[in-house]
Image (tube, grey):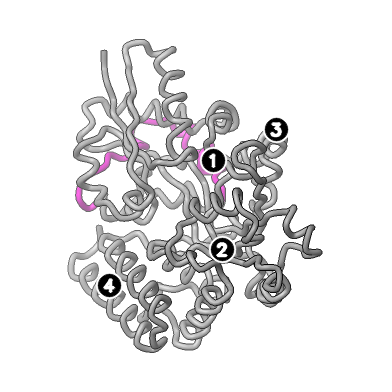
């Protein structure tokens, strides 16, 4: 019996479909046993994946880790074990840049098992009760907050430290300037505007929003009646399915930004990668191909709580009917989502930015001082990357 061990994150969306797919794979490959273990959502964002890869045969990872993992020799190119026709199908049926985000140095290092970006969430019953509609612009977002305020209902964005950076990144790109691509983290006019917007989001939001991540705010939205809308958070299809929580949460495109489109949301999702320590990489890659196939993605993967990475599942009438059009209603945002840097050393910038931005919001900081700190973290990482040369 060959046993493969994998690590994913601890949420219905991240964990529940994987043991089911593992059992299905074993049913047709009786000499293979696959065991999945969980790590917290915070660890999903922050834990050192090169170290994690030493302990597992497969890891579910966020795309900004790719460059660092490759540089550390932690992964094997998954394309080495898969046919060109399969890889071409994955590329043609990615959601936004999900598939491309796991490519690096001419190789494919993971398959998009899950697709996500920051989207908007709302309680349709609460909006209807208060005679409101889903905002389509940022002006409408803040107008909705004012409209709801007398009733004790808020517009809230999850802004715990690991979610401050995604919101900053999305707001920059949504406004027409992608951050962390030039000499500075972002231009001063854009940086000041975005920090002011984030400060306003704190002022209109739930008192606990600075301590919440997306699942926590969605759990609250779906069980209490004091948050009607969230303009930016990573979407979770689970909350759009009847019966998952007390109240249904629906999802929509983010507010329109530059050019009048719901563009620039930070790309999230998850890739399924094979560790370089895996003794049977060809079997692990074959299982990964099984899990990310169109049939499994829109079938058992979705049915057991997963959020598919294959476009066929996002267009499927059955999955949309089961999740109140979660996929159709957010696909434009996913297709226009912005990819983060992925070079070795980037994760240190992202971690520093989370702390800098959260400190700014928590302690009513100075915008220019915070932007100086972001610039310093960005310069340090770029200099280190330049000294090391191409990965």
> What residue is shown with label 2?
232
Say whether residue 238 is left or right of residue 284.
right
Mark pair 2, 1: CA separation:
18 Å
Q: Are marks 3 and 1 in contact (CB under 8 Å)?
A: no
Q: Which residue is drawn at 39% across and 88% down?
A: 366
Q: Is mark 4 on a helix, strand or loop?
A: helix
Q: Is mark 3 on a helix, strand or loop?
A: helix
Q: Residue at x 33, y 85 (%)?
A: 372
Does 176 appear in magenta?
Answer: no
Which numbered circle lies on residue 318?
A: 3
> What residue is shown with label 4?
382
- The crowding category of the residue bearing disc 3, from other C-alpha atoms within 10 Å (few below 14, some 14 to 19, many at least 20), is few
Precedes in sequence: disc 4 or disc 1: 1
Q: Do the residues labelled 4 and 3 touch (CB within 8 Å)?
A: no
Mark pair 2, 3: CA separation:
26 Å
Instruction: Give residue 279's position: percent from left, percent from top.
Output: 21, 27
Q: Give the range drawn in magenta.
A: 71-95
Instruction: Give residue 373's position: percent from left, percent from top.
Output: 31, 81
Q: Which residue is drawn at 54% across and 66% down?
A: 206
Residue 5 falls in image quadrant: top left
Does 94 appear in magenta?
Answer: yes
Mark 2 or 4: the one toward you? 2
Mark pair 4, 1: CA separation:
34 Å
Q: Do the residues labelled 4 and 1 touch (CB within 8 Å)?
A: no
């Amino acid at each position: 019996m060959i046993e493969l061990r994998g690590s994913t994150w601890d949420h219905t969306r991240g964990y529940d479909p994987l043991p089911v797919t593992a059992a299905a794979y074993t049913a047709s490959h009786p000499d293979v046993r696959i065991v999945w273990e969980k790590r917290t959502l915070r660890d999903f964002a922050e834990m050192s994946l090169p170290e994690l890869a030493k302990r597992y045969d497969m890891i579910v990872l966020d795309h900004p880790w790719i460059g660092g993992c490759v540089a550390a020799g932690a992964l094997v190119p998954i394309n080495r074990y898969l046919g060109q026709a399969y890889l071409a199908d994955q590329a043609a049926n990615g959601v936004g840049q999900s598939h491309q985000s796991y490519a690096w140095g001419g190789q494919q290092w993971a398959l998009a098992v899950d697709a996500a970006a920051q989207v908007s969430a709302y309680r349709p019953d609460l909006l209807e009760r208060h005679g409101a509609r889903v905002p389509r612009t940022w002006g409408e977002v803040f107008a909705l907050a004012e409209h709801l305020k007398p009733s004790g209902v808020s517009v809230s964005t999850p802004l715990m430290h690991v979610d401050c950076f995604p919101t900053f990144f999305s707001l920059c790109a949504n406004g027409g300037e992608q951050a962390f691509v030039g000499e500075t983290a972002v231009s001063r006019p854009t940086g000041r505007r975005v920090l002011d917007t984030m400060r306003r989001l704190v002022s209109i939001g739930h008192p606990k929003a600075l301590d919440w991540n997306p699942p926590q705010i969605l759990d609250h939205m779906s069980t209490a009646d004091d948050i009607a809308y969230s303009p930016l958070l990573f979407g979770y299809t689970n909350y759009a399915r009847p019966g998952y929580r007390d109240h249904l949460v629906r999802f929509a495109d983010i507010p329109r930004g530059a050019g009048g489109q719901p563009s620039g949301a930070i790309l999230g999702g998850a890739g399924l990668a094979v560790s370089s320590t895996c003794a049977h990489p060809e079997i692990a890659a074959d299982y990964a191909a099984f899990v990310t196939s169109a049939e499994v993605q829109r079938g058992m993967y979705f049915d057991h709580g997963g959020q598919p990475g294959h476009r066929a599942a996002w267009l499927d009438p059955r999955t949309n009917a089961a999740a109140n059009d979660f996929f159709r209603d957010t696909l434009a945002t996913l297709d226009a989502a912005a990819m983060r840097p992925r070079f070795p050393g980037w994760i240190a910038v992202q971690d520093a930015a989370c702390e800098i931005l959260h400190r700014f919001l928590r302690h009513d900081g100075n915008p220019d001082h915070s932007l100086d700190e972001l610039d310093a973290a960005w310069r340090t990482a770029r200099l280190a990357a330049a000294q090391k040369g191409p990965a």
